[in-house]
Amino acid sequence: QVQLVESGGGLVQPGGSLRVSCAASGFIFTDYVMNWFHQTPGKERELVAGIAVNGVSTNYADSVKGRFTISRDNAKNMVYLQMNSLKPEDTAVYYCNARAWKNGYEYDYWGQGTQVTVSS
């Protein structure tokens, strides 16, 4: 079955770095755009970064541009989010998302999330 398993979250001090990873299985990874979203209590899930199937085209939320880098390894079915210069406002649950459009249908898969806390 489809699985997206995030790992690498934790507690980090402001200004620090963290890399979260997502292991994908159960679907054709190279058919899917991969995204990272984050969510804080009481707020909607927001797109943080996305990467195209070829791993070349990326997009970022304005709030993380220049600090976060999304990447993917199509040989390993992995997607990563490198987070640098972390701020307390980056504190959230980070979710891995896989999305594709095939034959008129949208396919949308989510991981269970990993907590990232930025605090001194």
Image (cartoon, rainbow, N blue to C red):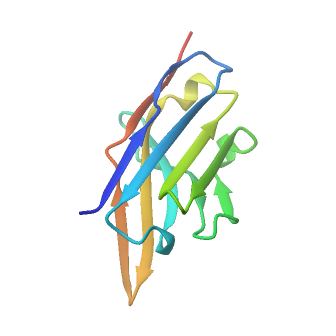
**Which residue: 31% across, 65% down?**
26
- Outermost residue on the left side: it is 1
- Above or below, 77 against 27 in this view is above
Is residue 80 left or right of 9 when viewed as pictured? Answer: right
- Outermost residue on the bottom side: it is 103
Is residue 72 left or right of 65 when viewed as pictured? Answer: left
Observer-nearest of 31 and 49:
31
Which quadrant holds the C terminus? top right
Observer-nearest of 10 and 73:
73
The image quarter containing residue 90 is: top right
The image quarter containing residue 2 is: bottom left
- Outermost residue on the top side: it is 120
Observer-nearest of 74 and 120:
74
**Which residue: 62% across, 53% down?**
71
**Which residue: 57% across, 57% down?**
73
Q: Tell me where residue 63 appears, x and y as whole percent.
A: 66, 41
- Outermost residue on the right side: it is 66
Observer-nearest of 31 and 76:
76
Q: Tell me where residue 23 appears, x and y as whole percent.
A: 42, 50
